[in-house]
Image (cartoon, helix red, strand yellow):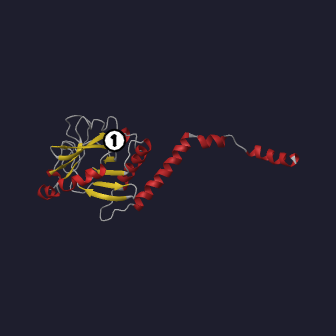
């Protein structure tokens, strides 16, 4: 019996390549495979996103938001399966905030949102992490606890990206309602009013949005800024 097995074993050993094991464990190949599968997953989510009566977010903005969201979920930083996307490449006259339920892959709410007064007029073009800059900060945040302040119910935000938005707490960058964030202001002056760096939303729906996203959900503020893309470790 052993004489029959030996030739087969000999052929197998000749065909075996040690590099096969190395390829399977090659970090570069693993990373490339992971990236391809992530891209496919993001494309599928985008193609099947249930927007209901709302508008679709741009693919570029959505894909980066979802990429970072998955990383933060895996790390346990984000605990609530809600993703809020703010696209500051759009005019402040547009509804550029989306709240997405990641369990059902559906848009729950869409709203206008203000940027910082020193970030730009109708469009946000300049961003900062510095105190007293009165500018918006890009990148990924987790939502914190709520409190009642001068704007009523407000939501604290924790910036997750060093040097990009990690001063959010010390700058008192929070989500809150504001009269200047109402759509009626757009009709009066041709653009939304501006904040001191906070993502301010209409009083008409601020409580609903804050209740949905509070307590460790993910917020992503997007702009096609090369500076941000070079600094961020959460997007490719």
Left or right of 216, for residue 11 = right
Residue 187 screen position, x and y as percent: 14, 59
Q: Name the residue at 45% across, 58% down.
A: 44
Point 30% across, 50% down: residue: 213
Element type at mark 1: helix
- Residue nearest the viewer, comparing 123 with 97: 97
- Counting every numbered tag in the picture gives 1
* Residue 91 seen by the camera: no
- Please state if 63 lies on the left or on the right of 213 as rendered: right
Q: Position of residue 131 (x, y in %)?
A: 22, 34
Q: Residue furthest bottom?
A: 53
Q: Residue at x 65, y 41 (%)?
A: 21
Residue of label 1 = 228
Residue 40 horizontal side relative to residue 107, left or right: right
Pick the residue in front: 185 or 231.
185
Q: Residues within 10 Å of mark 1 (few under 14, many from 20)?
A: some
């Amino acid at each position: 019996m052993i004489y029959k097995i030996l030739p087969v074993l000999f052929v197998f050993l000749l065909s075996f390549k040690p590099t096969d094991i190395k390829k399977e464990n090659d970090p570069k190949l693993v990373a490339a495979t992971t990236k391809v599968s992530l891209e496919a997953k993001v494309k599928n989510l985008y193609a099947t996103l249930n927007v209901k009566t709302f508008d679709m977010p741009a693919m570029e903005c959505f894909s980066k938001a979802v990429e970072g969201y998955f990383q933060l979920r895996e790390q346990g930083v984000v605990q609530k399966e809600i993703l809020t996307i703010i696209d500051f490449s759009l005019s402040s006259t547009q509804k550029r905030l989306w709240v997405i339920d990641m369990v059902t892959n559906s848009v729950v709410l869409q709203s206008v949102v203000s940027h910082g007064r020193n970030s730009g007029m109708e469009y946000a073009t300049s961003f900062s992490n510095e105190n007293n800059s009165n500018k918006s900060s890009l990148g990924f945040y987790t939502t914190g606890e709520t409190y009642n302040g001068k704007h009523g119910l407000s939501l604290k935000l924790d910036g997750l990206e060093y040097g990009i938005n990690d001063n959010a707490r010390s700058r008192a960058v929070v989500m809150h309602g504001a009269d200047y964030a109402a759509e009626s202001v757009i009709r009066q002056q041709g653009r939304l009013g501006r904040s001191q760096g906070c993502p301010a939303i209409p009083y008409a729906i601020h409580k609903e949005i804050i209740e949905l996203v509070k307590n460790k959900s993910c917020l992503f503020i997007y702009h096609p800024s090369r500076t941000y893309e070079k600094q961020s470790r959460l997007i490719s």
